[in-house]
Amino acid sequence: MNVNNDIKNLKPQKGTFINGLYHIQHPEKYIGDVMKCIFRSSYEKKFMIYCDSNDRIVKWASEPFPIVYFNPVDKKEHRYFVDFYIKLEQEDGTIQEYLVEVKPKAKLQPPILKGHPTNRTINQIKLYNAQCKEYITNWAKFKAIKVFCELHNKKFLLVTEDFLFGENYKKGVGIEKPKKTEKQKQADRELKKKRKAKKEMELRIKSQELNGKS
């Protein structure tokens, strides 16, 4: 895998998030310049420790290369460096490559405009607008990463605090999505059928209402 190190010229900055240089313990596993392994949040640092110390991670890289994505906010194309690349030995012994984004769960949920409609402050509205832009931008990035993975035989993973502070992190397992059992697959199919039937029913009712008015 070719690594583009352009972003490594962007040094750690003082700000809201903890950031700095990670000191790699197993340089033979790392792809890229071991002197420029930069974490830009405490969550990223914790994931780096996982990659560095876990024997199942055969190779890994931070901010390996840029991916072009279309941002609906400004209606322009941008370059984004995915957080991590890992080559993981799975439980069945096969090797799978992943592109990984590390994000707090709060960043993955639609923002909520706080305060009562009659007494919201300008700052509350500004914060909500900024959170909406970030939310839309994040999912535009994820969409582009998923397309890239499909084209290059890789898988996409979103890592949150559920994994980073959970038991699986301590055990060094469970980062990949578990395969669904036949029972779970059947439940998913039944749920899909119910949703489809409900949608068809709503369309029929709406059609009858429109015909009744005409």
Image: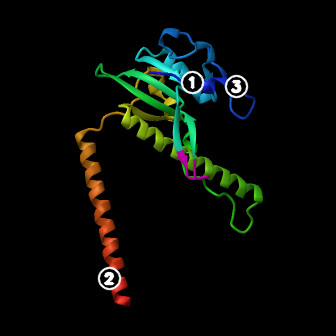
Colour mode of the rendering? rainbow
Q: Does the magenta stretch include residue 176?
A: no
Location of residue 135 in the rendering, given as x and y in whole percent from the top left corner: 58, 48
Label 1 crowd (10 A; few <14 / some 14-19 / many >=20): some
Examine the rendered structure and indicate whether residue 23 appears above or below residue 139: above
Is label 1 or label 3 in front? 3
Residue shown at the point (55%, 10%) measured from the top left:
25
Please report contact status of discs 3 and 2: CB closer than 8 Å, yes or no.
no
Residue 87 appears in the rendering: yes
Location of residue 202 in the rendering, given as x and y in whole percent from the top left corner: 34, 72
Location of residue 165 in the rendering, given as x and y in whole percent from the top left corner: 53, 29
Residue position marked by numbered label 3 in the rendering: 12
Residue position marked by numbered label 1 in the rendering: 46
Give amino acid for label 3: Pro
Say which label, 1 or 3, has the lower sequence index. Answer: 3
Say which label, 3 or 2, has the lower sequence index. Answer: 3
Residue 165 appears in the rendering: no
Find the magenta span and give its range: 70-76
Give amino acid for label 1: Lys
Q: In the image shown, does 173 or 200 lie closer to the viewer?
A: 200
Residue shown at the point (47%, 42%) measured from the top left:
144
Q: The C terminus lies in which quarter of the figure?
A: bottom left
Give amino acid for label 2: Gln
Residue position marked by numbered label 2 in the rendering: 208
Say which label, 2 or 1, has the lower sequence index. Answer: 1
Q: Does the magenta stretch include residue 72?
A: yes
Horizontally, residue 208 falls left or right of residue 143, namely left
Q: In the image shown, does 1 or 131 lie closer to the viewer?
A: 1
Is label 3 or label 2 in front? 3
Label 2 crowd (10 A; few <14 / some 14-19 / many >=20): few
Location of residue 171 in the rendering, given as x and y in whole percent from the top left corner: 44, 21
Does dot 3 land on a helix, a strand or a loop?
A: loop
